Image (cartoon, rainbow, N blue to C red):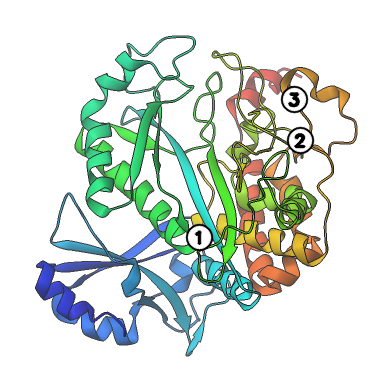
Amino acid sequence: MTTDLAQVAKERDIKYFLISFVDLFGTLRSKLVPARAIADMQAEGAGFAGFAAWLDMTPADPDMFGIPDPDSLIQLPWNREVGWLAADLWMNGKEVEASPRIVLKRQLARAEQSGYRMKTGVECEYFLINQEGTAISDPADIQSKPCYDQQALMRRYPVIKAICDCMLELGWGPYQNDHEDANGQFEMNWDYADALTTADRHVFFKYMVKTIAEQHGYRATFMPKPFAELTGNGCHTHVSLWDAAGETNLFLDDSDELGLSGLAYHFLGGIMHNATALCALFNPTVNSYKRIDAPRTLSGASWSPSSVTYTGNNRTHMIRIPDTGRFELRLMDGSTNPYLSQAGILAAGLDGMENGRDPGKPLHIDMYAEGHKVRSARKLPATLLDALRLLEKNKVLRASLGDEFVDSYIKLKMQEWGEYTSHLSDWERRNTLDC
């Protein structure tokens, strides 16, 4: 039975609803709807002009409607009179094929038809910076190895506590908060869940962190590489595949050296087979490629991958298997679109299982120190342009995610690349003015 949002509003004293969607660039778009109108919005959707967001539409296109998913409802812990809702986009009575949440739902439906349910957890790193975005917020956070620094962590205790308290209230199961490897950088972990739930929470988490940071006079950024000398923001994703009921972990095999089943290795093989093209989704900004294969940072390591490899419990590879029955994909960065990230994982993994893709043997070496010796390992793309070209010609992802989505995404991202390349930078002036 579908949840009646109007009734929920009365029971919880919700006065307004944010009906929200994420566009192709990962930007969160919303309309603020008074509770008196939510019944109509639940039935018909909130109206949007698609061209006004980063979607491949024109001003001549008809209204686009965001139909809220009542199962996604989150009552803002810091403002309980507002409820947040993830919406699915419709136009002309049909789902918008190239909208990120629909792209993910199509992959989940495809997996369900084969009796699979993907569960994931994300580790969203972010910086707390000044309002101008020019420096970290804490001038005393200066250790060369600041990871887990208790003093720096506790100086930002009011912010971290406020965010974690919200997750506790929402029932997400947060279990640890830490100062990360860069000065001014933090990470907060909560329980894994079904992929759509994780994606919705990921979207809300970014909004929540930014909002609470602002309330404390700071600014939060998930930018992949906001400071050249510091470790970038990753968004490591833990992945497992379960039966349709969500009761049996199909990746788990205790007899295997790394605790993974044959199915898991094929899924892993699919991700590795498509990894370079997936970068267009996992690392979707110009800035993303300043994090991948980055030089040593002040802390001594970038903690980002450079090649398509996997391993056991070793953080220098693109894929780490830290425990039985799951793996950690370390490729994504903080700018990844939460829905497209999950959709890309599942599309590639299903391809791996359907085609029996072999990931090869794991490598148990320090890729930062010895990676140059592994000549068989494919390098990750060096720029967004390289990644977009790889996605454009990737037949697996086209067939899975759909031509309409892939073409729309590449079209808009190529426009972004064009804007970047036409920008005249200070570096160019310094190095070319007197040529």
Residue at (28% x, 47% y) in the render:
167
Q: Which residue is mark 2?
A: 307
Please give the label number shown on residue 367: 3
Q: Is residue 168 left or right of residue 423?
A: left
What x and y, as percent, mark residue 178? Answer: 38, 27
Please give the label number shown on residue 195: 1
As measured in the structure, the alpha-carbon distance from the residue carrying label 1 to the one carrying label 3 is: 30 Å
Q: Residues within 10 Å of mark 2 (few under 14, many from 20)?
A: many
Q: What's the residue type where badge 2 is placed? A: Ser
Q: Farthest residue toward the bottom? A: 93
Vertical comparison of 95 with 277: above or below: below
- The reply to whether discs 2 and 1 touch (Cβ–Cβ < 8 Å) is no
Vertical comparison of 247 with 403: above or below: above
Q: Is residue 388 left or right of residue 53?
A: right
Task: Give whichever of discs 1 and 3 has the lower sequence position.
Answer: 1
Q: Farthest residue toward the right? A: 375
| Disc 2 secondary structure class | loop
Q: Is residue 43 left or right of residue 373?
A: left
| Disc 1 secondary structure class | helix
| Disc 3 secondary structure class | helix
Which image quarter holds the C terminus?
Answer: top right
Which image quarter holds the N terminus?
Answer: bottom left
Task: Give whichever of discs 3 and 2 has the lower sequence position.
Answer: 2
Q: Is residue 130 left or right of residue 26?
A: left
Where on the picture, by quarter, is residue 399?
A: bottom right
Residue at (66% x, 45% y) in the render:
254
